[in-house]
Image (tube, rainbow, N blue to C red):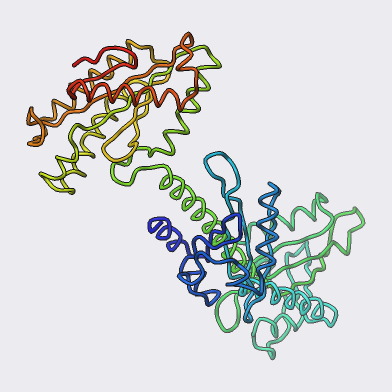
Amino acid sequence: MLQIEAVYDKVPVGLCYLNRDGVFVTVNDQLSRMLGISSDHAIGRLVEDIVPDHAALLRVSLVTALEEKPVPDHELQRSGETFMVSAAPVTNDLGEVAGISVAYTNITNMKRMSEQLAQVEQRTAYALESAGQWIWDMNIATNRVWRSPQYRALLGLDPASPETENIAWDIVHPDDKQGAIQAFEDVVSGRKPYFEAIYRVPRGSGGQAWIMSRGKIVEYGPDGSPLRLLATSVDISSQKLIEEQLSSTVRMRLELEQKLLEANRKLKKLSESDHLTDLPNRRKFNRLLKREYDKAIDRGQSVALLMIDIDHFKAYNDVYGHMAGDRCLVQVGRVLNRVVREGTGVVARFGGEEFAALLPAAMMADAIDVAKTIIDTVAGLQLDHEGTPAGKTSVSIGVSVLDLMSPATLGGPDELLNLADRALYEAKRAGRGRFSVWGSFSTD
């Protein structure tokens, strides 16, 4: 659980996990700070006790998830701030909804920026209505442009400058000039009915202003050739700034979603792995065993199961200490993983000093070969063990194989596991350091 909380605390959003009963199981530090609650106080208590102001919202999300329906996002107003509350179902190994993972994202600034954008759009509309823009008139034949006085006022230029005609596109930023000229050529050629371009121009005080220009051909010659383009321009720098800020917010949201996905992957791995050996744990092994057993029954194939126990491991811990015992478990786990994965099998730490190996589609002879290889390879480690008669670490192995002709092995994956466990007991009783096949004689 500490490892899971560490993953939650690395994610820069408020996170919590509620079980099916609406009880807090995990609350990260970000959420504690956001809602002003203590994680230690919250864990193990109902949402109504911790967040009564929006417990109903969380209950609705939980019920929706339990009904296996899409859980919508909700906005939450709290202490002058706005949060986006997003919930997603969390399933157990059986695919059942075990609860919901809830993310609180503070969108106060994004809401404020959205409101500012709306205000800017209103101001722009007012400016257009009251001529708070400039007009320009282009003589297409001479490529000269006249601009109205508002041009100088809006860009902070000297308003006392005399009105003059300038070369078209002379004020456009070099990086934007080609786009503006292309828009002009589109309307002159008749490919488009209107001129529309967005580009940058210099301000009188320094820096650049983003300009949006719109216009149309207003005069044609006797031969139908365009003579004049009349257009209006407006400063949209504020909108562009907000667009950039919103784009940044969207990028941050995508990054947060990616981090949440990574956190979920890490949580899944933590829930299915043994923390010491990094092998699959007992829960994952049982799930794999059921899957492979059912597959073998459906296809009329076999599947083998090996239960592996380090001999006299308690004595090993007594002699060498628990840290040395952990190192022994890791070394043996690596050996087992290497041997079993040479085929298509999987090995897991079943608990304590006991491991389990699953060999899909393996016949009895295949399982015996693997058992012999494991015994020889572990012996080859030459790990000292004063608590055994031989003075070296060894393993005992019990083998069971699904036999479609045997009623015992058709009792299900749990029964196959029980048979391997009984065979392991026989191997230990016969002297350890050997394997035993269910129902047959133990051998070195």
- In the image, 163 versus 130, the foreground residue is 130
What residue is drawn where x is 34% and y is 43%?
274
Q: Is residue 152 left or right of residue 345?
A: right
Residue at the far front: name it: 429
**Residue 164 placement: quadrant:** bottom right
Q: Is residue 238 visible?
A: no
Q: Is 218 placed above or below 160 here?
A: above
Q: Nearer the viewer, residue 280 or 437?
A: 437
Which quadrant would residue 118 be assigned to in this image? bottom right
Instruction: Tell me what residue is drawn at x 83 percent, y 51 percent.
Output: 190
> Farthest residue toward the bottom?
160
- Name the residue nearer the viewer: 172 or 302: 302
**Numbered label tally:** 0
Look at the image and tell me in which quarter the C terminus lies: top left
Residue sitting at 84 percent across and 62 percent down? 216
Residue 30 on image: x %, y %? 49, 69
369 on left or right of 134: left
The vertical placement of 172 against 314, above or below, is below
Position above or below: 298 against 58 = above
Quadrant of the image containing the N terminus: bottom left
Point out residue 82 in the picture as x, y percentages from the top left corner.
Answer: 64, 74
Looking at this view, name the residue that lies furthest to the top. Answer: 405
Image-based side of 385 in relation to 231, left or right: left
Task: Work out whether residue 428 can be spotted.
Answer: yes
Give the image location of residue 237, x and y in percent. Answer: 65, 74
Q: Which of the two residues, 307 or 86, is positioned nearer the viewer here?
A: 307
Please report the residue visible at 46 percent of the width from the left and 30 percent of the height from the top.
288
